[in-house]
Structure formats: C-alpha cells, structure tokens
Amino acid sequence: MTAPNVLVLRSPGANCDVESAYAFELAGAKTESIHIRRLLENPSLVDDFQILCLPGGFSYGDDVSAGRVLGNEVRLHLADACNRFKEAGKLVLGICNGFQVLMKTGLLDVDDDQGPLATLTLNDSGHFEARWVRMAVEPGECVFLQGLSDIELPVAHAEGKFVARDQAVFDQLASAGRLVLRYTAADGSSPAGYPANPNGAMGDVAGVCDSTGRVFGLMPHPERFVEHTQHPRWTRGGIDGGVGLKVFENAVGYFR
C-alpha cells in the first residue's frame, strides 16, 4: 500500500514541526507542513491526509494559556473538518503543546455537558521542566503505543500537569483505558514523585487517548528520540535505537 499522508499543523510559535515531520518520514510516511491560516482558509485540505499531527512548541506564545488560542481556532472554525477526519477512522497525534491544544478541541473526548473532564495546568514546581523521564505504558486500544511497555523520553514544558475534575472522573477515565501513559520512578515503580513526575500530574498521567484509541496526546516528545544518538547516555552503550520512533511507526503501520 502507498504511504499514508501526514498533515503537520504549523502555527505561530510551533517549533517541533520539522522534527515531527522527520520522525513520520523515518517511519515511512509522506508529510506536509501546513500553516493554520491556510487550513482556516480551506478546511477541506485535511481530507487529503490520513494522520494529523499537532506538534510541540509555544503556539501563539502560550500568551493566554498553553494551547488555548490554537485550540479555540480548531474548535470554533475547524470542528466539522476535524470531526469528519476522526469519523473516517483516521489518526490524530498531539505532542506537548499539541496535547494541550487537543485538550481544548473536543477531539480527545474529555468534555461533557458540565464542561471539561480534565485539563493540563501549571507544573507544581512553578517553572519550566526539561529532563528525560521514564514511563509505564498501558496501550489498551491506543494505536500509537502498541507493542510498548515502558519508555524513556524527554519532556520540556511549564503546563503539563494533568488534573481530572474529581477522583470519580479520574477513575472513570482509568477504567475506560484512556490513561495510557504514566510517569514512573527510575526503577519503574510508582507513584513517581518529583522529579520523575515532572509536573505533579494526577495519577502520574503523561498521555491520554480518546475512546477509539485513534486520538492520542502526550506531554513527552517521541520525535526527540528517534535515533539512539539522541539519548544522553548513547555513548555508554545499551541504547537500542530510538524508542520514540515506534510511536510513529505504529501510526504508519495502522494504514498498511
């Protein structure tokens, strides 16, 4: 089969779009970076793609809050196109700022009649956190995480703390298999505690998928570990490839 087409959505302040496109190309996809303004002018462009990627960065400078402006643009002006995309069985990936955007669009199914079921807010530390973290994977139906059990990836964010509306909602999301990625301590144990959990996320949550498993958002950056030389300990040996690449290979493989 032909390689799937990936739309990498660019916006003012996005700075991981090139790396995300490269990761998808390594995995065997064809990519095109499209600016949000162009998509707003012609929402039907999205129909030409099988995967939508919302990359990391600081969309619109995170001036209001992380991802809110771009999330509102998608929710208010691209809802029909994005819902059509999702209903067609296609894939959506949001990385870091892209995850923050997804949480505000409705694509992750984290809203009900009372409002958001969960959100991403300021790190408990009160400052930007950038480090490598270890995570346990419970892939369930999540297309992007199939075949993975534990991974190590870098994070770089100031608003990555996952918080559910209340404990009952958290338990509901967990029992539905939606909380697919969680921070762990270096030895794989949990709860992780700071700094292994870099933001104080409720239940150590690092990534969430929608009810179909085809929409996935995560705070860590898989596109920053697609080759073994990107790992800080690669010269010491024992680093087998770039585990982040598997996330992109799973997405590409879904269409083959």
Image: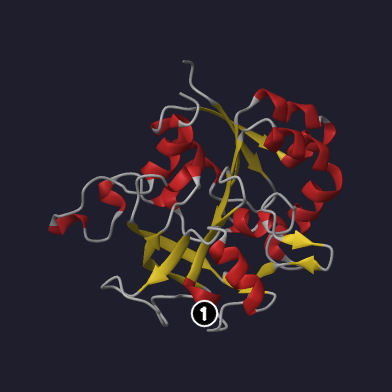
- The residue that disc 1 covers is 200
Check disc 1 and give the amino acid type. Gly
Q: Is residue 145 left or right of residue 103?
A: left
**Residue appearing at x 33%, y 55% in the figure:** 149
Image location (x, y in percent) of residue 81? 78, 35
Image location (x, y in percent) of residue 143? 49, 42
**Residue 189 higher or lower than 126, as above or below:** above
Q: Residues within 10 Å of mark 1 (few under 14, many from 20)?
A: many
Residue 201: tell me if it is visible.
no
Q: Which of the image's four quarters has the C terminus?
A: top left
**Residue appearing at x 74%, y 53% in the figure:** 106
Q: Is residue 214 left or right of residue 62?
A: left
**Residue appearing at x 65%, y 76% in the figure:** 168
**Residue appearing at x 43%, y 38% in the figure:** 250
Q: Is residue 78 left or right of residue 27?
A: right
Residue 177: tell me if it is visible.
yes
Q: Is residue 238 left or right of residue 183?
A: left
Extreme residue toward the left, this view: 237
Quarter of the view holding residue 37:
top right
- Of 220 and 141, nearer the camera is 141
**Residue 221 higher or lower than 251, as above or below:** below
- Of 216 and 11, nearer the camera is 216
- Mark 1 secondary-structure assignment: loop
Image location (x, y in percent) of residue 65? 72, 68
Image location (x, y in percent) of residue 206? 50, 65
